[in-house]
Amino acid sequence: MSSIRQQDFIDSIADALQFISYYHPEDFVRSLAEAYRREESLAAKDAMAQILTNSRMCALGKRPICQDTGIVVAFVKVGMDVHWQDASMSVAEMVDAGVRKAYLLPDNVLRASVVADPAGRRKNTGDNTPAVVHFDLVPGNKIEVDIAAKGGGSENKSRFTMLNPSDDIVEWVVSQLPGMGAGWCPPGQLGIGIGGTAEKAMLLAKEALMQPIDMTELKARGAQNRLEELRIEIYDRVNALGIGAQGLGGLTTVLDVKILDYPTHAASKPVALIPNCAATRHVHFVLDGSGVAQFEPPKLEDYPDVHWHPADDARRVNLDTVTRAEIAGWQPGETLLLSGKLLTGRDAAHKRIVDMLAKGEKLPSGVDFTNRFIYYVGPVDPVRDEVVGPAGPTTATRMDKFTETMLAQTGLIGMVGKAERGKTAIDAIKKYGAVYLMAIGGAAYLVSRAIKKSRVVAFADLGMEAIYEFDVVDMPVTVAVDTQGRSVHEIGPAEWKQRIGIIPIKQIV
Ligand code: SF4
């Protein structure tokens, strides 16, 4: 029987969360580097270069891979012979104590993203608690933990269906991908749960994402059972859709497809699908009573020799003087380097602005969007000498319902976010001659290096959702919707879907 100290468990959870906040799993880096080398779409290759460069920078700087530092999900397997030496808390409370310690660590403070009262006031809990914890009692005298920090953008694209027993699982999965858009920040993985009941399938899909990426090895040795056949078939067919990194069109949308299954009712075929994003963060550890878990950092040589820098011909834009006439010349897919003042705002700030406008109220001083751009972001708080912590884009699609009002009533001429825009937003962009630019989701630390000054100008009570004014220099973005409503997220995947049908895809083995 092993004896586990409460503080060892709490400290192990905290150390694990700090570790995964700045170290990608080694298998993810290796797999993304392979995909980068294979990629033939210049836009997708550039996005992957940003993600790989960001990954190395985060490892060196010990700062979060993404501004969305995730909601904590833990699978805890407790050996039935384990003795808790001094426990005064439940195991779930211990996990939360570890989360609190990790997310408030002064040297690498992580963004608190969890809100309580989700159907009502949605108030931030301040320390990213509570975690979502799943328990299993197993034989033995150890505690095994798989812990992840799951990004909201990818979690939001989860899917579930109850198929008929004769229905085709691959068809259903492949049919879901176009509708998931790019808000889940591909390239990443798909976790799939098959069987059990509705809730069991969802749990299997999430747990499947804790497995290491090994598609290259699987393809090299060939499938040895039905689940491995499914994994390869889904992987190939999803990548043949041409969605590509960040939805820009390209050869790699998924790096791997992980599947877990469970016996089910003869009348049922539940299938769950949960994507994991470019900020894949998870780690496994075991406690056997000998103390706090140890985590081995990756070596610098584990990172590929990829160092993103802007293309020489990228168009430089002065945000302080840019005009409607100037933005009308920008082409979908064009790279821009933004310099000047950039206001921020995401879900809560948009809601408040639109409510104020509806009541005929004036916006706070400092919030003048005339001929300005807004950046959809909720940054991590700064530490040490930073002006702002990692500050990558959040999913723009959630702001679609506010876009018409913002463009019609505030003088705004452009937006910066990630992923595609929906029809209502694109119609408004076209109507008002505005533009939508995208930054790379999962390259938050790299993007934050372009931010030279930051101050809160309104709605400070909203925390990370407050309105900031950033001074940026050469912030890299891509024109995603031009003034005529042409969307790179439609053009790119359509082109690459067709090309994948024509050009030979380089072997990954
Ligand atoms: S990479 Fe995208 S989906 Fe993942 S945590 Fe970051 S913003 Fe969210």
Image: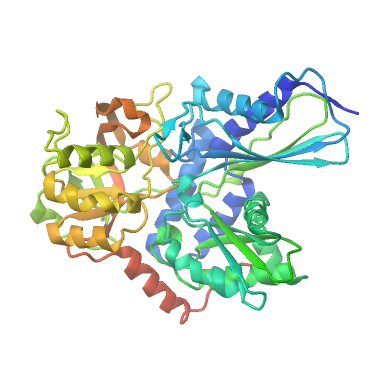
Residue 270, image x and y in percent? 64, 64
Residue 150 drawn above or below residue 463: below
Q: Answer left or right for 434 relative to 99.
A: left
Picture quarter containing residue 411? Answer: top left
Residue 23 drawn above or below residue 477: above
Please state, as top left, top right, bottom left or bottom right, where the N terminus lies in the image. Answer: top right
Residue 177 drawn above or below residue 128: below
- Residue shown at 33% from the left, 68% from the top: 490
User: Foreground residue, 65 or 434?
Assistant: 434
Colour scheme of the rendered structure: rainbow
Residue 372, image x and y in percent? 16, 43
Residue 390 seen by the camera:
yes
Q: Residue furthest bottom?
A: 502
- Residue shown at 12% from the left, 46% from the top: 409
User: Foreground residue, 471 or 357?
Assistant: 357
Q: Answer left or right for 380 relative to 81.
A: left
